[in-house]
């Protein structure tokens, strides 16, 4: 499965010139539009539009997986003169790519939490992501890559958004599941801040 995905992302790179940073920028530019869709989905509670919003969200969040996969494939792949597309310096700049990847995740999550209003859990997560965004911009090059704690935090944040959408539009999500995901996401956000600021 992974080998097929590797071939797929390299095909996108060679055939269409899609770079990891282009996929990352997709999350940044899609964030306000996806947030608008979430707002309309939870206010209108139209089943078809909720499904559309969830599919749109899955597509956008999947770019976070594919940009990392493509970056790893390009970095370990020797550049040949007969390549259809030359590997440019931007693609090889791991520090910039790592910072941009982390920043795009934070922009996306902050935008997607706005439709759920200002309350304790959105305040804590948005505040935490703002702190981490500042750290991503100002940290030295060797610390711009995501940590293990950051990746786990992002996994739960990625899960949180559809859970919130479904809990606001359907009865599919039990309260215990909703609050468990919220609490774990807040804890992991705090742990990610700690790992970036206090762990060398």
Image (tube, grey):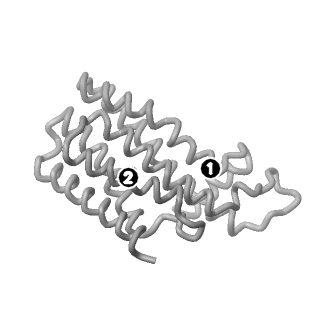
Residue at the limit of the structure toward the bottom, as seen here: 200
Nearest-to-viewer mark from 1 and 2:
2
Q: CA distance from mark 1 to mark 2?
A: 20 Å
In the displayed structure image, the side of residue 97 where residue 152 appears, left or right: left
The quadrant in which residue 16 appears is top right
SS of the residue at dot 2? helix
Residue at x 19%, y 39% (from the top left corner): 167
Residue 110: percent from the left, percent from the top? 37, 43
Query: Is residue 65 at all visible to an observer of this figure?
Result: no
- Cβ atoms under marks 1 and 2 closer than 8 Å: no
Residue 152 - label: none
Q: Residue at x 67, y 55 (%)?
A: 10
Which residue occupies the foreground of this view, 162 or 7?
162
Q: Quick one: SS at disc 1?
A: helix
Whether residue 118 is situated above or below residue 80 in the rendered picture:
above
According to the picture, the residue beneath numbered tag 2 turns out to be 129
- Give residue 177's position: percent from left, percent from top: 16, 52
Residue at coordinates 38% horizontally, 68% vertically from top-left?
A: 149
Q: Which residue is mark 1?
A: 21
> In the image, is 72 to the left or to the right of 57?
right
């Amino acid at each position: 499965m992974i080998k097929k995905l590797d071939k797929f992302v390299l095909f996108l790179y060679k055939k269409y010139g899609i770079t990891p940073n282009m996929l990352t920028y997709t999350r940044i530019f899609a964030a306000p539009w996806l947030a608008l869709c979430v707002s309309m989905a939870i206010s209108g509670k139209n089943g078809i539009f909720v499904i559309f919003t969830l599919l749109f969200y899955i597509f956008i969040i999947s770019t976070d997986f594919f940009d990392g996969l493509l970056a790893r494939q390009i970095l370990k792949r020797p550049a040949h003169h007969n390549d259809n597309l030359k590997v440019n310096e931007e693609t090889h700049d791991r520090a910039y790519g790592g910072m941009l990847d982390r920043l795009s995740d934070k922009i996306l999550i902050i935008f997607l939490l706005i439709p759920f209003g200002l309350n304790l859990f959105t305040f804590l997560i948005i505040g935490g992501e703002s702190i981490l965004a500042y750290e991503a911009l100002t940290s030295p090059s060797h610390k711009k890559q995501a940590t293990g704690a950051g990746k786990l935090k992002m996994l739960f944040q990625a899960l949180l958004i559809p859970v919130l959408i479904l809990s606001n539009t359907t009865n599919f999500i039990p309260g215990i599941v909703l609050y468990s995901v919220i609490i774990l996401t807040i804890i992991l956000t705090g742990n990610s801040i700690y790992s970036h600021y206090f762990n060398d």
